[in-house]
Amino acid sequence: MNSIRLHLKFDPSVVMYLVIVDKLLQRQSDLLKVKPSEKFFDMVREQVISHLVDGKEPPEQIAGPILNIADDMLAGREVVMRSGDYITLMNYARSKKLL
């Protein structure tokens, strides 16, 4: 793998700029209370780097969020995490025991 450094950390309370509807909040409220671990950020970093550098497609479950992050980076924009992307990544991290 090529050497690339990717600073990717965020404060979930700031990042989730969309209003989450009550039904979604009731189902996923535990994910919003969990602070992302270093393993979580490592997983996201690895997936983004793998996609950008090696051209590998991310796992289907998190393809959307990873591609959104990669698009922001390629466009030179600050990475903006959408609330649905955050919840998707947290669900994936939980399924992989990274939280």
Image: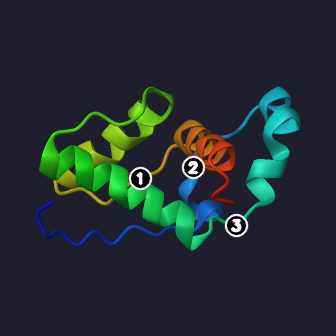
Image location of residue 88, percent across then percent down: 59, 38
Residue 64, located in which quarter of the rendered image? top left
Q: Comparing marks 3 and 1, which lies closer to the viewer? A: 3
Image location of residue 86, percent across then percent down: 57, 46
Q: CA distance from mark 3 to mark 1?
A: 17 Å
Residue 68, located in which quarter of the rendered image? top left
Question: Is tag 1's residue or tag 2's residue first in the polypeptide sequence?
Answer: 2
Residue of label 1 = 80
Is 26 left or right of 10, judged from the image as shown?
right
Q: CA distance from mark 1 to mark 2?
A: 9 Å
**At 76% from the left edge and 31% from the top edge, which residue is drawn?**
21
**At 40% from the left edge and 32% from the top edge, which residue is drawn?**
63
* Viewer-proximal residue among 68 and 94: 94
**At 70% from the left edge and 66% from the top edge, which residue is drawn?**
35
Image location of residue 25, percent across then percent down: 81, 38
Q: Amino acid at mark 3?
A: Lys
Local secondary structure at mark 1: loop
Q: Amino acid at mark 2?
A: Tyr
Labels 1 and 2 touching (C-beta < 8 A): yes
* Viewer-proximal residue among 66 and 50: 50
Q: Give the class, few, some or many, for how many residues have Cα within 10 Å of label 3's Cα (few <14, many ≥20).
A: few
Question: Is tag 3's residue or tag 1's residue first in the polypeptide sequence?
Answer: 3
Q: Give the class, few, some or many, for how many residues have Cα within 10 Å of label 1's Cα (few <14, many ≥20).
A: some
Q: CA distance from mark 2 to mark 3?
A: 17 Å
**At 68% from the left edge and 48% from the top edge, which residue is drawn?**
94
Q: Amino acid at mark 1?
A: Val
Q: Tell me the number on the disc at residue 35.
A: 3
Residue of label 2 = 17
